[in-house]
Image (tube, rainbow, N blue to C red):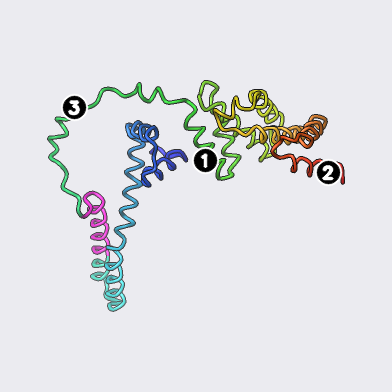
Amino acid sequence: MKRLNDVHEDMLERLFADELQPDDRQRLRRELDDPDFKSELAFRNALKKVAEQKRMEDPLRKELQRIRQANKGGGGSLRWLYSAAAAVIAIIAIIWIINPPGKQPAVDNTIATLIKPPTDLSQASQTQDPGEDNYKSGKIQFKKQQYAPAIESLEQVPAESKYYHVSRFLLAHCYLYEGIKPQEAVSIFESFRKEMTPPSKLAGEYDYDPDKVEWNLMLAYKAAGLQDKYSKLLQFLSNNPDYGFKEDAIELRMKELGK
């Protein structure tokens, strides 16, 4: 049975809350063509209904416990009664799952033989962006501050994906948070810094903050042991009157100088 990943979980939560966007609704429709995906959803729905049905089972169980306490030592007949009642409870639960209260009886099976199935939809699934799942999964994990699993997802986004660019951006931050691959983080932030000249070039498209890119590039220099580049950039930022985090840069520079 196919396990639902973080992206599926997020889409289902937003679907039930009526917050799912049209493109994600279309995506979910494509997923529902997968028999394993439908089986997983059916299994979850069954578990949910059994949990709801528990309120029907509890009174029966309490009554059985009362009879058992009142007839201790009653021998095989009581054990048979208890086993039979338990079986009845299980059957009630199964019936409730298949045909819950208020649900209309299933349509005549002959209708199923008359349905004209849709044209093969494999082409629709092939048009899905190859990096979409991993990007969205990585973004969710990033928001949860689960940086190690986020790295695993984001590193799998291929270069041909439209999500590759933003995935690399998140990936650089994850590397800094986890204290790994500092040279890779430097390379990513430097490429963004170059693309942000002029600053509005990327900011308008992705809502990136060029001041934050400069700051995080500076931290990546330090993490990579590039002390000279780190010191020069820190000095530049602390002296730049237009820099958004100038006060933070000044404070950090003073601390570095031991003042």
- Label 3: state its secondary structure: loop
**In the depicted structure, whether residue 61 falls above or below residue 15:** below
Q: Residues within 10 Å of mark 2 (few under 14, many from 20)?
A: few
3 or 1: tag closer to the N-terminus:
3
2 or 1: tag closer to the N-terminus:
1
Type of the residue with mark 2: Met
**In the depicted structure, whether residue 136 falls above or below residue 159:** below
Q: Residues within 10 Å of mark 3 (few under 14, many from 20)?
A: few
Residue sitting at x 33%, y 34%: 32
Q: Which residue is mark 3?
A: 116
x and y, in percent, of residue 175 in the image: 66, 35
Between disc 2 and disc 1, the foreground one is: 2
Question: Picture quarter containing residue 150?
Answer: top right
Residue 254 is marked as: 2
Q: Which residue is mark 1?
A: 140
Type of the residue with mark 1: Ile
| Mark 2–mark 1 CB contact (< 8 Å) | no
Q: Is residue 106 magenta?
A: no
- Label 1: state its secondary structure: helix
Most foreground residue, 11 or 81:
11
Measured in 3D between alpha carbons, the distance from the residue under mark 3 to the one under mark 1, in whole angstroms, is 39 Å
Magenta residues, start to end: 83-101
